[in-house]
Image (cartoon, helix red, strand yellow):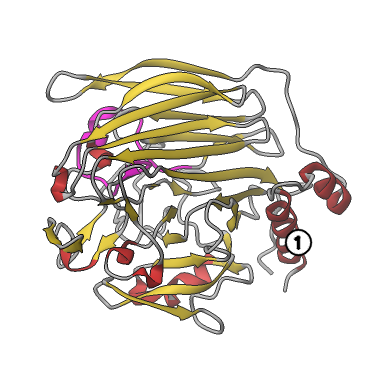
């Protein structure tokens, strides 16, 4: 293993460990590498402005969040979309690490859910139907033969109510949406609240909260495509990935979930050791690059633990993803073919980004072997996903091609 790869492996593990409750992140980073995260005296803030108008005349807004410590993002209340996420590298260059557009019109056109909130159920419901409490519920087969990402007009295409609030003394963008009974075929009136905030430790925190008046499947996620070298920089082949998972949810060639689990040890989708994506992607299922990894300790409900670490040797950026959800669906953007042009005015080609879709396994609507996905009246849906950014010491790294 190359020396720089070994350093990334050690640093990724240290930073993932440091995100656990009760662990002093600063002491771990300092002890292991002699470095500390940079802090700033600039105040955290959220600014809002008009983003554009929907065809029905309603206005969508764009909110700019900043933590004053080198992390900022833009989020629109149309679809809850993260349109930009700017991270400061060790050399003080700012990099936008998510794919997307800089105007509302492009988001109103066809695109693969760039940066959006997905619901009611993220992922594929096999056979586009489910049975609940003695009743069959047919759904749109918008990814035939399956139902994908909540249907043709899921949460990613809704205009959310927006408010700026304080959460743990951090400015938070709060988006709310009432999904009506029978919307896209799902039962129950479901009130959903999403909170976006940036911590002083350069963490993007996404909190999901919901209640219902009828039993319904519910599994929410964010569909951002990450590229730590910067959006529009090309593919993610030279970036590295580690996933803390021992099992996957099994699918067939049509990406239909079969309701069973399988170990990853020794298989092409084993990412328990840090792997270069360009070497791993060709081996992934059906070249689709779309796998449900079952989170370690998924049985410990509500516990926020590291799920994956992504790193880019060229920029020196590291992203650690933590979640309370049971699974992380990894998608390597195989659908991108150059027909969409992003913020950098460059076309997005295959593998231009990678999604970390933290969610419940959608096949749980058919079998409890893969977890619980039904929300009932009186219960509260509550989950958190964190994308934590840091830099490798002495970066950016320049990797020799020899």
**329 over 50 or under it: above or below:** below
Q: Quadrant of the N terminus?
A: bottom right
Q: Position of residue 142 (x, y in %)?
A: 15, 57
Question: Residue 57 in the image: x percent, y percent?
Answer: 15, 18
Q: Which residues are magenta?
A: 98-118
Split into 4 quadrants, where in the image is the C terminus? bottom right
Residue 99 lies in magenta, yes or no? yes
Give the residue furthest to the bottom.
266
* Residue at x 36%, y 47% (from the top left corner): 220
Q: Residue at x 52, y 63 (%)?
A: 298
Residue drawn at point x = 74 percent, y = 28 percent = 39
Q: Secondary structure at mark 1?
A: helix
State the predominant SS element of the stretch in magenta.
loop
From the viewer's perspective, tell me whether residue 375 is left or right of residue 247. Answer: left
> Which is nearer the eye, 208 or 151?
208
Q: Is residue 241 magenta?
A: no
Give the total of numbered labels.
1
Judge by depth and name the residue closer to the eye, 255 or 362.
Answer: 362
Percent coordinates x, y for residue 123 in the rendering = 31, 58
Q: Which residue is mark 1?
A: 10
Q: Residue at x 77, y 66 (%)?
A: 3
Q: Position of residue 299 (x, y in %)?
A: 53, 64
């Amino acid at each position: 293993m190359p020396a720089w790869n070994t350093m990334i492996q050690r640093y990724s593990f240290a930073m993932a460990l440091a995100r656990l409750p009760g662990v002093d992140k600063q002491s771990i980073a300092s002890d292991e590498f002699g470095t500390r995260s940079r802090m700033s005296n600039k105040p955290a803030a959220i600014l809002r402005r008009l983003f554009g108008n929907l065809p029905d005349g309603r206005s969508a807004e764009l909110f700019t969040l900043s933590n004053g410590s080198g992390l900022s993002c833009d989020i629109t209340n149309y679809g809850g979309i993260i349109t930009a996420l700017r991270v400061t590298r060790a050399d003080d260059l700012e990099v936008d690490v998510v794919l997307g557009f800089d105007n509302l019109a492009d988001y109103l056109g066809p695109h693969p859910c760039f940066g959006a909130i997905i619901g009611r159920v993220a992922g594929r419901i096999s056979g586009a139907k489910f049975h609940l409490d003695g009743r069959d519920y047919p759904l749109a087969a918008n990814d035939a033969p399956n139902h994908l990402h909540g249907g043709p007009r899921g949460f990613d295409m809704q205009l959310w109510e927006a408010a700026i609030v304080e959460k743990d003394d951090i400015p938070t963008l709060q988006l709310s949406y009432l999904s009506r009974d029978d919307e896209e075929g799902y039962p129950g009136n479901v009130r959903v609240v999403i909170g976006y905030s940036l911590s002083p430790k350069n963490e993007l925190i996404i909190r999901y909260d919901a209640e219902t008046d009828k039993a319904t499947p519910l599994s929410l996620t964010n569909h951002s495509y990450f590229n730590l070298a910067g959006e529009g920089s090309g593919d993610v082949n030279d970036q590295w990935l580690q996933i803390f998972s021992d099992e996957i949810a099994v699918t067939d060639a049509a990406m239909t979930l079969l309701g069973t689990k399988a170990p990853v040890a020794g298989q092409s989708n084993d990412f328990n050791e840090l792997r270069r994506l360009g070497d791993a992607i060709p081996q992934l299922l059906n070249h689709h690059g779309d796998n449900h990894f079952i989170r370690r300790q998924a049985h410990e409900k509500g516990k926020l633990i590291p799920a994956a670490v992504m790193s880019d040797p060229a920029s020196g950026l590291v992203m650690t993803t933590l979640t309370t959800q049971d699974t992380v669906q990894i998608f390597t953007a195989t659908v991108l073919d150059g027909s969409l042009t992003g913020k950098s005015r460059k076309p997005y080609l295959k593998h231009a980004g990678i999604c970390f879709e933290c969610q419940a396994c959608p096949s749980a609507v058919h079998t409890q072997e893969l977890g619980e996905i039904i929300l009932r009246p009186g219960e509260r849906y509550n989950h958190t996903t964190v994308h934590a950014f840091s830099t490798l010491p002495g970066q950016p790294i320049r990797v020799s091609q020899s």
